[in-house]
Image: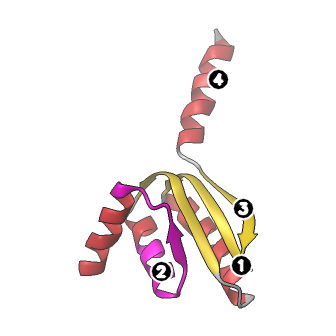
Amino acid sequence: MIQDRTARTLSAFDQRMLKISKAEPVHHAVILRLEGRVVGPWVTELQKSCDEVLTEGRSLKLQLADVEFMDAQGVALLSHLRSRGVVLLECPPFAAEQLKANGRS
């Protein structure tokens, strides 16, 4: 019984996380693959990961196909990164709409 509850708790916790992983570079650009939710403390972690690449003078692409949700901070960060030349790949429709709306504000 306890084991089942723990599994459910871990599963619920995993759904709130953001996984950031490096994909194989393409044309010398660093590609970070995002999986999960771009929210809360994970926005800061994503910013740190991106800043690390950008301060090295390398080009950066973010693969967003597996992003499930973004809060206002996540949308603001991705908009800011895009303005710095970061390319957003495979942007889900909901994220594209949020970014489009953020650009109008």
Q: Is residue 9 left or right of residue 80?
A: right
Question: For the point 26% across and 71% down, which residue is it?
Answer: 101
Give the amino acid at mark 4. Answer: Thr
Tell which residue pokes out farthest to the top in this image: 1
Question: For the point 54% across and 65% down, which residue is it?
Answer: 43
- Label disc, if present, on residue 82 of the rendered structure: 2
Q: Spatial distance from mark 1 to mark 3, Cα to Cα?
A: 12 Å
Percent x, y of residue 99: 35, 70
Tag in front: 2 or 4: 2
Give the amino acid at mark 1. Answer: His
Tag in front: 1 or 4: 1
The answer to which of 82 and 71 lies nearer the viewer is 82
Please give the residue where the numbered disc 1 appears in the rendered image.
Answer: 27
Span shown in magenta: 76-93
Please give the residue where the numbered disc 4 appears in the rendered image.
Answer: 6
Q: Spatial distance from mark 1 to mark 4, Cα to Cα?
A: 43 Å
Percent x, y of residue 52: 71, 80
Please give the residue where the numbered disc 3 appears in the rendered image.
Answer: 23
